């Protein structure tokens, strides 16, 4: 079974204060652009901060940044407490 690259990607983006484009992440990870494009869309805690013009193509590239989660952040006991009630469940 392959190991998830999500933690490596998050650490890579956290180490770059200005953020990274998908192409830069792919080169640093030794992966293809297409594979990395699919992966970064599924990584928790990263977001598109801004759009950067690609010099040769004149297109825009997303610059990804990462959310820093404080170590003392409390976790919820039960995410759905109390459980949400819909109209059809109330009766």
Image: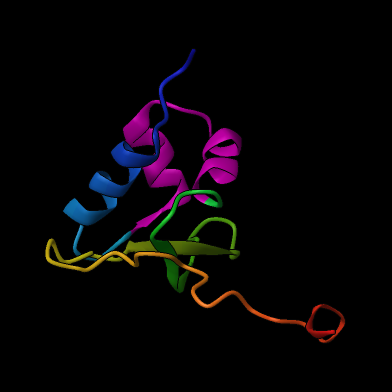
Report the quarter where the C terminus lies: bottom right
By what rule are the colours in the image chosen? rainbow
x, y percent for residue 36: 51, 39
| Quadrant hosting residue 28 | top left
Circle count: 0
| Left or right, 39 with reference to 76 | right
Looking at the image, the residue that sits furthest to the front is 91
x then y, percent, for residue 77 = 35, 64
Query: Residue 27: x, y in percent?
Result: 38, 34
> What span is colored magenta in the figure?
20-40
Q: Residue at x 41, y 22 (%)?
A: 3
Q: Is residue 22 left or right of residue 59?
A: left
Residue 36 or 52: which is nearer the viewer? Answer: 36
Q: Closest to the observer: 44 or 74?
A: 74
From the viewer's perspective, is 86 left or right of 54? right
What residue appears at the point 16 percent right and 66 percent down from the top-left corner? 70
Whether 84 is drawn above or below 77: the answer is: below
The quadrant in which residue 65 appears is: bottom left
Q: Residue furthest left?
A: 72
Residue 12 lies, in percent from the top left, at: 25, 45
Considering the whole magenta stretch, tell me its main secondary structure: helix
38 in magenta: yes
Instruction: Give left or right: position of 72 versus 2.
Output: left
* Residue under the image location 61 percent in, 37 percent down: 34
Examine the structure image and report whether residue 11 is included in the region drawn in magenta: no
Instruction: Indicate whether 62 appears above or below 14.
Output: below
């Amino acid at each position: 079974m392959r190991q998830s690259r999500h933690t490596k990607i998050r650490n890579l983006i956290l180490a770059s204060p200005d953020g990274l484009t998908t192409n830069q992440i792919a080169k640093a990870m030794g992966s293809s652009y297409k594979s990395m494009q699919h992966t970064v869309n599924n990584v928790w805690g990263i977001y598109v901060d801004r759009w950067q013009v690609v010099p040769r193509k004149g297109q825009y590239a997303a610059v990804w940044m990462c959310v820093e989660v404080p170590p003392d952040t409390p976790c919820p006991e039960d995410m759905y407490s109390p459980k949400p009630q819909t109209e059809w469940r109330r009766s």
